[in-house]
Image (cartoon, grey):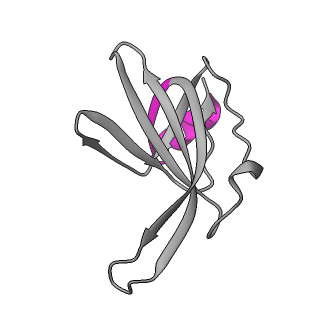
Amino acid sequence: MEKLIEAMKQGKVFLIGEFRGAKTDVIRYVDKKTGQASAFTATNYLVERPGALEVAMISQQVGDGTVDPTTIKVTAQKGKVYAFELSGMERVRGVFKARMPQGAEPLPI
């Protein structure tokens, strides 16, 4: 809790919610400027916001370049409440989507 308070004093934004699950995948795309195929590894967290009856999808890039998704361990436990640091957010077709900074960890509440 002290880490959370200290980070909030620094102006960081958090979403607090109940962790429901996570999945790590390799995301492949084509760079529009260069036409080159690229890929990166990302972990997608599913978080239920208490009181709002809403689910948030939070994505986080893992490592530099592509990392084998089977080597990534998610330490959060299903059903527990965590604070997720956010670096950006948007609502897409009614779904709240956000991004976590690389290297940030969910903080237990």
The location of residue 53, given as percent across then percent down, is 34, 15
Q: Residue furthest bottom?
A: 34
Residue closest to the eye, 30 or 63: 30
- The answer to whether any part of residue 11 appears in the image is no
Q: Image check: 71 left or right of 27?
A: right
* Residue at the extreme left: 93
- Towards the viewer: 65 or 103: 65
Q: Where residue 1 sits: x, y (%)?
A: 62, 28
The residue depicted at 59 percent of the width and 40 percent of the height is: 23
Percent across and percent down for residue 49 are 41, 22
| Residue 59 pos. (x, y %) | 49, 47
Residue 21 in which image quadrant: top right
Asked whether residue 105 appears in the rendered view, the answer is yes
Residue at the outermost right position: 71
Which one is in front, 80 or 46? 46
Residue 20 lies in quadrant: top right
Which residues are the magenta region? 1-17
Residue 30 within the magenta-colored segment of the rendering? no
Q: Could you tell me how many numbered marks the image carries?
A: 0
Is 13 positioned to the left or the right of 5 in the image? left
Residue 4: in magenta span = yes
**28 shown above or below 83:** below
The residue lying at 63 percent from left, 69 percent from top is 64
- Which quarter of the figure has residue 93? top left
Q: Quadrant of the C terminus?
A: top right
